[in-house]
Image (cartoon, rainbow, N blue to C red):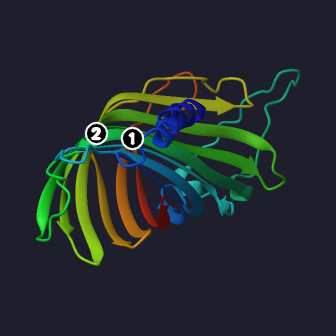
Amino acid sequence: MKNYLAIFFLIASTFIINAQKFHLRSGVGISSLNWYENQSTANFSFQLTYQKPNSSKLFFSEVKTFGNIANSKVDPAHYEFIPYQMQGQTQPMELDINKLSATYRGGSAEIGVLFNQTRGKSQPFLSPEVSFFSISLARKISTDITQYVEEEKYALHGLSAGLNLILPGKAKWIFSTKAFLPILTNFTLYGRYIGVPYETSSQKNEVSWRNQVEVDIKKFNFGIDYDLYNLGGTENLKSKTIFNSQNKMLSVYINYLF
């Protein structure tokens, strides 16, 4: 995510040059992730938009980060520990799978364009949207004494397209739904133990869905997101197979419009 943030703030620096065309918003929120475990995360976001005064196109870029608020107990039904032998030891290490905890973290970056965004409209209208979207998700497994065991990382990069219904007024409402198709995917499994692969390729690039309801009131933006990400799995005969999984993310947030 460091590269995403650097690119975003490089673009955001041009905001000072022409404030009439560029607009910045930032905000905080909280998400509930229903993945292998149920877990809550704290979120931070920045968005920059650009639109010429008489243009119907609005360009945008956005960066989001999220990290866990509290650990979750690992569900043994959704985790398999293979007792690898550690370097310098003659016996493989064993762990009590019922005493493991998981932490989630990740982030996303998006750059795209909204159409039919001519300013000054007073009647409800539709606005198509296309973008390049990238998201990364990580699940870290630790023991009850915080000893690191392993970490799964998913990275999905692809195209997103959707439709926005916009209701102008003193309170501006926006309802949107988007389909996300990963083009490039990567699955990484880190671990303390001999035999855990460091990097593999993920399989099955399935369509994911992103849904959103927002309302703009003066300088504030309030929103609810419900995203469903289909994550690929990986097969490794020498160590561990990770099956396909699905991450359901419900988020609420507030942004301030500069």
Left or right of 12 in this view: 210 = left
Q: Secondary structure at mark 2?
A: strand
Question: In what quadrant of the picture does the N terminus appear?
Answer: top right
Which of the pair 126/177 is nearer the observer? 126
Q: Residue at x 28, y 72 (%)?
A: 172
* Residue 233: percent from left, percent from top: 42, 36
Which of the pair 28/208 is nearer the observer? 28
Q: Is residue 49 above or below residue 188?
A: below
Q: Secondary structure at mark 1?
A: strand
Left or right of 233 in this view: 104 = right
Q: How packed is label 2: few (under 14 Cα within 10 Å), some, or many (20 or more)?
A: many
Q: Is residue 8 above or below residue 67?
A: above
To which residue does mark 1 refer? 110
Q: Residue at x 59, y 49 (%)?
A: 105
Which amino acid, by three-letter code, is at mark 1?
Glu
Which amino acid, by three-letter code, is at mark 2?
Ser
* Residue 160: percent from left, percent from top: 26, 42
Q: How packed is label 1: few (under 14 Cα within 10 Å), some, or many (20 or more)?
A: many
Specify the label residue 131 is tagged with: 2
Give the Cα distance between marks 2 and 1.
7 Å
Q: Is residue 15 visible?
A: yes
* Residue 161: percent from left, percent from top: 21, 44
Q: Is residue 206 visible?
A: no
Q: Would you say the residues marked 2 and 1 are in contact, meaning their CB atoms lie under 8 Å apart?
A: yes
Q: Residue at x 65, y 45 (%)?
A: 140
